[in-house]
Image: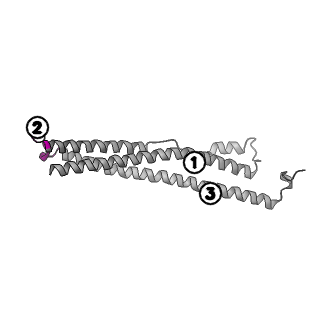
Amino acid sequence: MSENNPEHINSDEFNEKNKKFEFVYAEIKRVFDKQWEAADIIDSKAGNLIGFLGIIISLSFGLLSSRNLKLTSHNCIIFFSFVLILLGIISLFGSLIHVFMTIKARKFKIAPNPKNFWDSISKDKQIETPYHEILTDMILTTIETYAENKEHIQKKEEFLNRAVYFLLIGLFLIFLGVLIFR
């Protein structure tokens, strides 16, 4: 008989093998949990940005409707200032759209899927699957889930970064418009 036969593996070797699988799973799970934290942080930043954009857009519309900023065809400076502020507001709305794309609901996977996990270990309604095989399945599932969720989180990051760029451009244009008007 071969030494790879499970009947010939002593309990110390078996426990050591299981400990290695447990360690690997714990580390992969830790990284997976960090991924969820990153998604939560991105959503939190997006929520804060929505509040800030709401205030800035309201103030900007107040600038446009100001009695001091009446459009006349004779005054190019006032017209140019109006256009800059208007472009700034448009940029702020671009930022707002990207923020909403950041917090848009996406289908994230959970590892391991509870139903699939139970089905995989109770095929004959008897739990006879070796422990290390269960851990191996959990490890592989978590790795696959991590990779899929990583794509969603990268999209969220991209949208949030674009939102910040639009915000900065919008603020710059509005600030420039106000400076020119004064």
Q: Position of residue 70 (x, y in %)?
A: 12, 42
Of the two numbered discs 1 and 3 on the same chain, state the one appearing first in sequence.
Answer: 3
In the rendered structure, find residue 73 and report the number of the disc placed on it. Answer: 2
Q: Position of residue 26 (x, y in %)?
A: 63, 57
Q: Identify the element where label 2 is drawn.
A: loop
**Residue most toward the bottom?**
12
- At label 2, the amino acid type is Ser
Give the left or right position of residue 69, taking residue 156 as reference. Answer: left
Q: Are marks 2 and 1 in contact (CB under 8 Å)?
A: no
Amino acid tagged 3: Glu
Q: Which mark is residue 123?
A: none
Q: Is residue 124 left or right of residue 175?
A: right
Residue drawn at point x = 49 percent, y = 47 percent: 153
Three-letter code, disc 1: Tyr
Element assignment for label 1: helix
Residue farthest to the right, as pictured: 1
Residues rendered magenta in the picture: 65-76
Q: Which element is circle 3 on? A: helix
Judged left or right of residue 107, residue 85 is left
**Depth-wise, is mark 3 or mark 2 nearer the camera?**
2
How crowded pointer 3 is (Cα within 10 Å; few <14, some 14-19, many 20+) is rated as few
Q: Residue at x 70, y 43 (%)?
A: 120
Q: CA distance from mark 3 to mark 2?
A: 68 Å
The answer to whether residue 157 is seen in the rendering is: yes
Question: Which residue has dot 1 on it?
Answer: 146
163 lies left or right of 121: left
> Eyeballing the image, is 178 above or below 101?
below
Q: CA distance from mark 1 to mark 3?
A: 13 Å
Residue 53 in view, yes or no:
no
Of circles 2 and 1, the one toward us is 2
Task: Give above or below for 6 relative to 83.
Answer: below
The residue carrying mark 3 is: 27
